[in-house]
Image (cartoon, coloured by chain):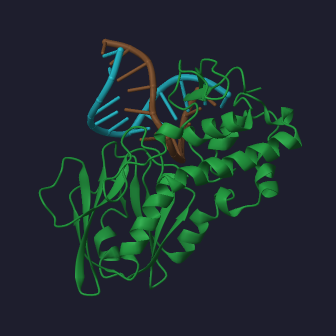
Chain colours: A green, B cyan, C brown
DNA sequence: CCGAACCTGTGT
DNA sequence: ACACAGGTTCGG
């Protein structure tokens, strides 16, 4: 489900309610994607959350003892606050019971496709993990962001955009949207980009991500936030999921191709 | 570089 | 029955 705007939306909602809370109890309905599998519960129970942070598409629960829980939603992972633990839904895997200022909170981790994971990490392991990512687009200047698209020279732009060690947080939707806004085809090799185009791309990446964040992200398929609400950016997409529909800029028919195994959407007329 | 894999569901 | 889905990793 999630790219930067969706994960950041979830981060903000988790942070508001979980910051300062203590994890009292964990129910593991299915432990296939929690690590370390056999010690997960004992490692996490009793911990107090100091803050929820995000790096790339990773959510980081920071604990007062400097250890952390990292969560990756991948395609369909989801945190959902529930008033009280009712009956377990089919794809619910973990139930967290927490207390904050004497009140009890319940949070469910669910994941239909089971690609997502929860992992308990030491502070050293956290630093190592977080260090593998490229710059955060919303916290990096345009000039530095533009430098993400310098090398390797023969690589296609779309591949660079999806590479989290190159630039963090961009996924399939916003890669296509940024290319369209910048007027650049995702099939272009990095070597063919001018500095002016790289700067334009960096600017448009920042714009599309922040505009989507304002709408609490895009619900193309399954994505919902921690309250079960859908994001509002779907109607503002210019190319993603619009194959055969008219370009909102020039009215040409939006084309869908496959690039690096991913569906890729572009306007053959206004993207060069 | 590409396709396959991980897993489940949905739509044609 | 087959294609496709917001992510990432692996093997060829």
Residue occupying the point 46% across, 59% down = A9
Up/down of A66 relative to B9, above or below: below
Residue occupying the point 52% across, 26% down = A242
Residue occupying the point 52% across, 49% down = A3
Up/down of A258 relative to A26, above or below: above
Up/down of A25 relative to A79, above or below: below
Please provide percent x and percent y for residue A226: 34, 59
| Residue A164 showing in the rendered view | yes
Please provide percent x and percent y for residue A169: 59, 52
Q: Quadrant of the C terminus of chain A?
A: top right
- Left or right position of A141 against A58: right
Residue A193 quadrant: top right
Up/down of A270 relative to A228, above or below: above
Please provide percent x and percent y for residue C11: 55, 34
Extreme-left residue of the structure = A87
Number of callouts: 0
Residue occupying the point 38% across, 83% down = A20
- Left or right position of A93 against A201: left
| Residue A151 showing in the rendered view | no
Residue B8 quadrant: top left
Residue A133 quadrant: bottom right
- Left or right position of A55 against A217: right
Please provide percent x and percent y for residue A64: 44, 85
Q: Quadrant of the N terminus of chain A?
A: top left
Q: Nearer the viewer, residue A162 or A206?
A: A206
């Amino acid at each position: 489900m999630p790219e930067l705007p969706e994960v950041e939306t979830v981060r903000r909602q988790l942070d508001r309610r979980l910051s300062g809370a203590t994890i009292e109890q964990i129910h593991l309905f299915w432990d296939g994607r929690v690590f370390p599998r056999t010690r997960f519960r004992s490692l996490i129970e009793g911990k107090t959350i100091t803050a929820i942070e995000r790096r790339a598409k990773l959510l980081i629960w920071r604990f007062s003892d400097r250890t952390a829980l990292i969560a990756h939603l991948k395609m369909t992972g989801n945190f959902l606050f529930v008033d009280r633990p009712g009956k377990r839904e089919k794809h619910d895997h973990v139930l967290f019971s927490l207390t904050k200022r004497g009140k009890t909170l319940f949070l469910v981790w669910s994941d239909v496709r089971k690609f997502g994971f929860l992992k308990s990490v030491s502070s050293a392991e956290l630093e190592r993990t977080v260090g593998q990512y490229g710059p955060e687009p919303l916290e990096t200047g345009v000039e530095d962001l533009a430098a993400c698209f310098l090398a390797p020279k023969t690589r296609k732009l779309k591949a660079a955009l999806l590479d989290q060690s190159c630039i963090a947080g961009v996924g399939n939707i916003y890669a296509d949207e940024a290319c369209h806004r910048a007027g650049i085809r995702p099939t272009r090799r990095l070597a063919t980009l001018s500095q002016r185009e790289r700067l334009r791309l960096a600017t448009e990446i920042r714009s599309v991500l922040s505009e989507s964040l304002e709408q609490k992200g895009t619900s193309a398929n399954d994505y919902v936030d921690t309250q079960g609400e859908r994001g509002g950016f779907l109607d503002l997409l210019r190319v993603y999921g619009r194959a055969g529909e008219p370009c909102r800029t020039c009215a040409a028919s939006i084309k869908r191709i496959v690039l690096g195994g991913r569906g890729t959407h572009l306007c053959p007329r206004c993207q060069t």
